[in-house]
């Protein structure tokens, strides 16, 4: 887990090319609102989308629209920036001992086929 106070970094360890990833971040504090999600060097050029589902968490999708894949390897694939309801950045997870969880993980391989996921390979 990498927590930088106002952002979470999603780390992925994949042994094959990946065209897309979808998941839900749950167990976020009520005050934390995702403001933006940005690709990293591993996902540059990918579409990144999110939808805040309130109590159910935040649904996140990373997808290649041009057939480019996330190369095999390990490292960050997304930076998730959040702020509290008053618009001030805080260290929610460090100060409040929060533990965000990834659920409903879906991964597509280079042929856009579903891949079984070891949850240890994708984490915040």
Image (cartoon, grey):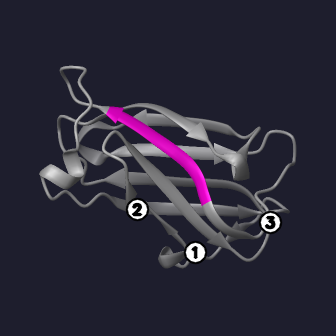
Q: On the rendered image, what quadrant is the N terminus found in? A: bottom left
Give the Cα distance between marks 1 and 3: 13 Å
Magenta run includes residue 81: yes
- The residue wearing badge 3 is 17
Viewed as shown, does residue 123 lie left or right of 93? right
Q: Position of residue 49 (x, y in %)?
A: 56, 35
Q: Is residue 100 above or below residue 54?
A: below
Outermost residue to the front: 4
Label 3 neighbour load within 10 Å: few <14, some 14-19, many 20+ = some
Q: Position of residue 19 (x, y in %)?
A: 76, 55
Res 35 quadrant in image = top left
Label 1 neighbour load within 10 Å: few <14, some 14-19, many 20+ = few
Task: Give the magenta part as a residue range.
Answer: 76-82
Helix or strand or loop: what does disc 1 sit on?
loop
Mark linked to residue 117: 1
Label 1 vs label 3, nearer the camera: 3
Give 79 or 28, whichever is nearer the viewer. 79
- The residue wearing badge 2 is 103
Specify which label sits upstream in the sequence, 1 or 2.
2
Res 63 quadrant in image = top right
């Amino acid at each position: 887990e990498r927590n930088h106070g106002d952002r979470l970094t999603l780390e992925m360890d994949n042994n094959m090319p990946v065209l897309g990833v979808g998941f839900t971040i749950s167990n976020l504090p009520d005050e934390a609102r995702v403001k933006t999600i940005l690709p990293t060097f591993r996902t540059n050029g990918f579409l990144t989308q999110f939808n805040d589902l309130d109590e159910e968490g935040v649904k996140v999708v990373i997808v290649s629209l041009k057939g480019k894949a996330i190369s095999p390897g390990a490292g960050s694939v997304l930076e998730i920036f959040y702020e509290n309801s008053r618009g001030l950045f805080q260290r929610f997870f460090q100060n409040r001992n929060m533990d965000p969880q990834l659920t409903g993980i879906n991964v597509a391989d280079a042929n856009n086929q579903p891949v079984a996921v070891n949850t240890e390979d994708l984490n915040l």
